[in-house]
Image (tube, rainbow, N blue to C red):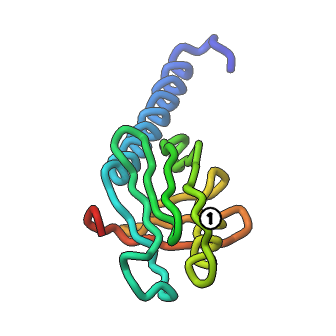
Amino acid sequence: MPLGNPSRFARWSVWTIGLAASACVAQSTLEASLAGKHFVASMSEVEDAKQRPRLEFVRDGRLAGYTGCNMLAGKWRVEGGAVRLEGLAATKRGCLGPAGDVEKRFLAAVGSSSSISLQGATLVAQGPGGERIAFAESPPNR
């Protein structure tokens, strides 16, 4: 952009700064909406609510969860208006039968390549293969 027109440059600068500020507000709003919150998967195939997969977005950027069979840990952050998961690790308990099926579905939707979004009060995780799980906010330790 030519810098010859100071008025035009000033308008462009204000617009750019405004755009960057609104992105920061959206990012901090999403971060505030998740930090310290617990979410439980809405999976009708799991009858016992205590056995449903869950995610906890700890305020310091840690992620804790349960796959339906194993415990899950990792990190989360908001980047570019999207939730990013990284460094995910799970315990290695053998999961057979229905619990294994639930875990496979969960891990297909929740991973470092997943799209995680907050749609109203519902957290939605969608894996790269299209597997999708919705989560409802829940009180801690449920």
- Please state if 10 lies on the left or on the right of 104 as rendered: left
Q: Residue furthest left?
A: 139
Front residue of 115/10: it is 115
- Image position, residue 71 (x, y; %): 49, 59
* Residue 75 visible in the picture: yes
Which quadrant of the rendered structure holds the N terminus? top right
Residue drawn at 59 percent across, 15 percent down: 5
* Label 1 crowd bin: few (<14), some (14–19), many (20+), radius 10 Å: some
| Location of residue 11 in the rendering, given as x and y in whole percent from the top left corner | 49, 26
The quarter of the picture where the C terminus appears is: bottom left
Q: Is residue 126 visible?
A: no
Relative height, residue 131 to residue 24 (above, below): below
User: How many numbered discs sit on the rendered protein?
Assistant: 1
Establish if 133 lies above or below 22: below
Residue furthest top as drawn = 4
Q: Nearer the viewer, residue 79 or 101?
A: 101
